[in-house]
Structures are given as C-alpha cells and as structure tokens.
Image: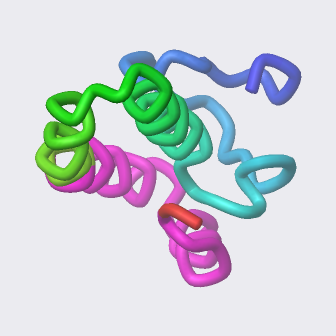
Amino acid sequence: MEAAGTNANPALPATTLIVSGPFGFSRNPMYVARTILYLGLGLLMNALCVLAVLVPLLFVMQYGVIRREERYLEGKFGDAYRQYQAAVRRWL
C-alpha cells in the first residue's frame, strides 16, 4: 500500500485503488489476515470464548466497517471500483 502511494490505515483517505498483489485475491486482505490470526490464536490458546466471539465480530466487520468502506470507495473511484468488485471477491 505504501509503494502504491496510499494510506495503509483504513481510517485515512484512500488515494489510489490497488487491484494487484493481495488485493487481486481479496478486496479485504488485511481483514482476512486479521481474522485468520484471531482464529489461530484462539485455537492455539484453546479459548472457546475467543472463538465464540468470532462470528459476531465478523458480522460487525461486514456490516459496520466493510460495507461503509465499499460505499466510500465506490463514491471515490466510481466505475473502476465497480469493475474491481465484479472481478475480486470480498473475502476469499
């Protein structure tokens, strides 16, 4: 993301639409990586309570964060982002 000249922090404005690298496989590679890390740590620690929170957490991420980001990116990048959405899955 830094090489492309855009912000890695999702709270900061996007300056470039990245469609290559990990973004060629998932529109949200950072969230996929964090989900896998969360799941792995929960399994490693044998913490069922951590794993039980995963589904509600993913629900909040999907509807509270990712959908908002997608509306923002569509408004900012227009047709280029819509084409990207059609070509690349949201998760995997």
Asked whether, in this view, residue 67 is left or right of residue 42, the answer is: left
Return the residue found at the far front: 46
User: Which residue is at a point 38% across and 29% down the rendered structure image?
Assistant: 42
Q: Nearer the viewer, residue 45 or 9?
A: 45
Return the residue found at the far bottom: 86
The quadrant the C terminus occupies is: bottom right
In terms of image quadrants, where is residue 61?
top left
In terms of image quadrants, where is residue 63?
bottom left
Q: Nearer the viewer, residue 2 or 75?
A: 2
Task: Magenta stretch: give its range.
Answer: 62-90
- When the figure is inspected, residue 78 is found, relative to residue 55, above or below; the finding is below
The image position of residue 43, as x and y in percent, is: 43, 34
User: Which residue is at a point 61% across and 77% down the rendered structure image?
Assistant: 83
The quadrant the N terminus occupies is: top right
The image position of residue 38, as x and y in percent, is: 42, 30
User: Which residue is at a point 53% across and 49% down the rendered structure image?
Assistant: 28
The image position of residue 74, as x and y in percent, is: 42, 59
User: Does the segment drawn in magenta span residue 41?
Assistant: no
